[in-house]
Amino acid sequence: MKALFIGGTGTISTAIVKRLSEDSNWEVWLINRGNRSDVIPENVHLIKADINDEESVSAQIKDMHFDAVCEFIGFTKDQVERDHRLFKDKTAQYIYISSASAYNKPAASFVITEGTTLSNPHWEYSRNKIACEEFLMKKYRTEGFPVTIVRPSHTYDERNVPLGVHGKKGFYQVIKRMIEGKKVIIQGDGTSLWTVTHNSDFAIGFTGLMGNRHAIGEAFQITSDETLTWNQIYETIADALNVKLNAYYVSSEYLSAVGDRYGFDFEGSLIGDKAVSVVFDNSKLKRIVPEMKTNIRFNEGVRRSLEYVLSHPECQTEDPEFDAWCDRLIDALEEAKKAI
């Protein structure tokens, strides 16, 4: 069987490509500009191209047909429209990576299933994903385009540490603040529920959908079965660092209001996603991919991540702007407490 990955070197897709490359039943191809070529297994075939150059890609895949085409970097409707033109006659399955942030926030029930309403007025990213899903499912209903929708939630790997509040340069500055004993901002009171998934576990569910006839025309969420509060997430990170957590709680609404002028999109990432308690029901996935389970609990996965990050300087991207912003925000709130 032959699979084509559009992207293939990101947090989620790297684990999937690695898992599939070790399966003798699959021949794996990537359309990729050549970024992070060091993570591409030797037996994976590379089509070096920009997927946005439709004419060039069309010429390179002219005589090819795939059992599965997997789209990891399609964020807007025009991008999946392009994919439909490119692959409608060239694949037996098209798997689109959407997002669990597309679910209504807050939903009627904190237990999320694939039937939970899709709606997110707080985040354009999520609304774009919904538009992509709607286009693809319309093509399935009217043309039989063999689409499968996959909705990940918060997935991480050895190069990433999942957090709720961080700056534009990523997670590392928060880790640095923890190590230095500084106060670390947590949205709300830290008691809302969240799910983080190691990319190697995600890969089990995803590869189980590939070539699976029961997945055509369906949507699946793929997450860990481990649900934690944000306090537990931050405390687990602090434990792995062998430091004391200095938590400082700020409402998501306040973070959104004061972060916006500095370019921090906390309305989308918090109010439209992480501030809301969610528990994912993965029973639909497990019915057709029975091997799916949580193998790497967060306490183990985050230790792996921190060991990698702290031993690889290229992963230690400092963010002095966000660091100073945290200090100013905390000082201002402390002054406000004194003034009342």
Image (spheres, rainbow, N blue to C red):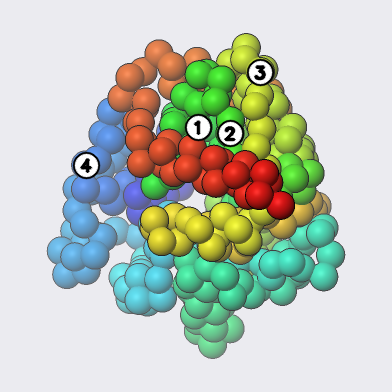
- Residue at label 1? 174
Asked if the residue at tag 2 contacts the one at tag 1, i.e. Cβ–Cβ closer than 8 Å, the answer is: yes
Distance of label 1 from label 2 (alpha carbons): 7 Å
Question: Judging from the image, what secondary structure is the residue with disc 1 in?
Answer: helix
First in sequence, mark 3 or 1: give its number: 1
Q: Position of residue 220 (x, y in %)?
A: 66, 59
- Residue at label 4? 34
- The quadrant holding residue 277 is bottom right
Look at the image and tell me whether residue 314 can be seen: yes
Q: Residue at x 47, y 66 (%)?
A: 125
Q: Position of residue 141 (x, y in %)?
A: 58, 83
User: Who is closer to the viewer here, 39 or 17?
Assistant: 39
First in sequence, mark 1 or 4: give its number: 4
| Mark 3 residue type | Lys
Q: Which mark is residue 184?
A: 2
| Mark 4 residue type | Gly
| Location of residue 141 with respect to 44 vertically, above or below | below
| Mark 1 residue type | Val
